Image: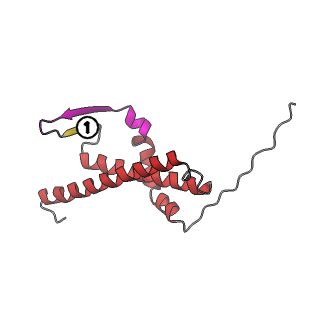
Amino acid sequence: MGAKPKPLKTTTLDPPDHPFVKSLRRQVGVLSDAAVHFTPEFLDRQTWRRTQYSDNAEWIRLLYFEPSQRVLERELLSLIGTHLTIAVLFDECVDGAFRVNEGWAKLHDEIAGRANALVDRFNKAKKRWKAEDGRPS
């Protein structure tokens, strides 16, 4: 009783050629800004406006200092991808222990599926924006 435990010593492996680690390294500059402006906690504290239109279209708008809807959508998509990459890397660190959990796998796949659907919608809208701006898509 009263004995001080031995310090925990960990080994950090940083595989330089791992595709997910490379992807996260490319995001470092973006993530430093995102750490402040695009975290779920930060976004949760923002003012949101929900508008229902007569054609059953619905918009959820973030009243934010960035005036471009395009920029906000792009950054949110990037944030989703980054978080999914981190989750997959954590799963690899524990030899796939998360993936074998049916609930975790279902949530991961649902988030990834929704993210892919959003990317498709964003890319279609981007082509339309370029056409409206007179730029080639």
| Residue that extends furthest to the bottom in the rendered view of this protein | 17
* Residue at 29% across, 49% down: 71
Q: Quadrant of residue 63?
A: top left
- Residue 120 pos. (x, y %): 28, 57
> What is the basis of the colouring in this image?
secondary structure
- Is residue 118 rendered to the left or right of residue 104? left
In this view, the residue in front, 103 or 133, is: 103
* Residue at 46% across, 61% down: 23
Q: Which residue is mark 1?
A: 60
Q: Amino acid at mark 1?
A: Ile
Q: Is residue 128 above or below residue 67?
A: below
Q: Secondary structure at mark 1?
A: strand
In this view, the residue in front, 36 or 87, is: 87
Q: Quadrant of residue 3?
A: top right
Q: Is residue 78 above or below residue 44?
A: below
The count of marks equals 1
Few, some or many C-alpha atoms within 10 Å of disc 1 (few <14, some 14-19, many ≥20)?
few
* Residue at 46% across, 48% down: 106
Q: Quadrant of the N terminus?
A: top right
Is residue 43 rendered magenta in the image?
yes
Magenta-highlighted residues: 39-55
- Residue 104 pos. (x, y %): 51, 47
- Residue 82 pos. (x, y %): 44, 53
Q: Quadrant of the C terminus?
A: bottom left
Is residue 89 rendered magenta in the image?
no
- Is residue 94 rendered to the left or right of residue 46? right
| Residue that extends furthest to the front in the rendered view of this protein | 102
* Residue at 19% across, 60% down: 127
- Residue 26 pos. (x, y %): 45, 60
